[in-house]
Amino acid sequence: MDDDGLKPHILKGQPMSEIAESDLRSLHEKILVCTLCRLSETRRRAVPGEGPVGAKIMFIGEGPGRQEDLEGRPFVGRAGKFLDECLQSIGVQREQVFITNIVKCRPSEKSGNWIRDRKPSADEITACSPYLSRQIELLNPEVICTLGDTATSEIFRRFGLEEDTIGHVHGRLFLAGRLKIMPLYHPAAALYDNSLRQIILIDFQGLRRVISQTKLTSY
Ligand code: URA
């Protein structure tokens, strides 16, 4: 993709946070009208992501589901409610973190009379990838939490970490330069397998420790 327009437009004397905020806003406007892949043909609304530009923690899921596609916001369905609960369990409010996905439009498929979610394909991930790169660049987070296997393999690949299953890496901390990466099970997994609920909550306690050790003062 030609990334013209995804570069910062710096005006002399303007604070960096304002520049990042306005660049993030224009990036999200681009995402809302993006037609780079077939997901744009079936989406109702693109879901760029949300959170303050000063967020030091970024959560990255796989892709919007049905509810997210309707509302244009990430993690607002049942999995999102559990994500909110996990954040609350460590004293963090959803509004303090940035939440987005690997692909910004809902990957769906027909199944009989139903439309159901599916995993994004490799070409859809590639088409969407400059958007996530720019979000990471603008937010410059201290910690990235990947939610589930799709987000974990994509972020591990990008940052040169050795790929492994989410079952092996969940709750562990990985370093890519000064960036901390913590893979977590996808919150939706707990909706299908109740035993994962407790494991996810324990992994979030690990994130709490990272927040304290890193002295992320806004949390
Ligand atoms: N699952 C995801 O991966 N992302 C969302 O935004 C919602 C559900």
Image (cartoon, rainbow, N blue to C red):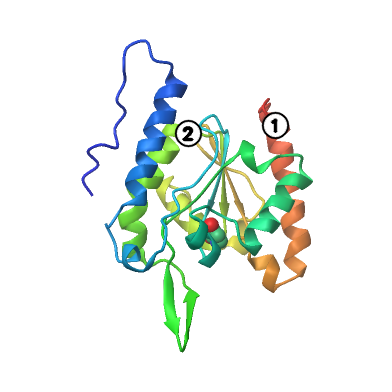
Q: Mark 1 — residue?
A: 219
Label 1 neighbourhood size at 10 Å, few (<14), some (14-19), many (20+)? some
Earlier sequence position, callout 2 versus callout 1: 2
- For this orientation, the residue located farthest to the bottom is 112
Q: Nearer the viewer, residue 49 or 212?
A: 49
Where disc 2 sits, the SS reads helix
Image x and y of residue 9, in percent: 29, 25
Q: Which mark is residue 139?
A: 2
Image x and y of residue 38, in percent: 30, 66
Image x and y of residue 179, in percent: 52, 36
Q: Image point 47% across, 72% down: which residue?
A: 118
- Where does the C terminus fall, quadrant-wise? top right
Mark 1 CB lies closer than 8 A to ligand 1: no
Q: Nearer the viewer, residue 215 or 38?
A: 38
Identify whether 125 is placed above or below 48. Answer: below
Q: Image point 71% across, 30% down: which residue?
A: 213
* Amino acid of disc 1: Tyr
Can I make out residue 23 in this image? yes
Q: Is residue 196 left or right of residue 54?
A: right
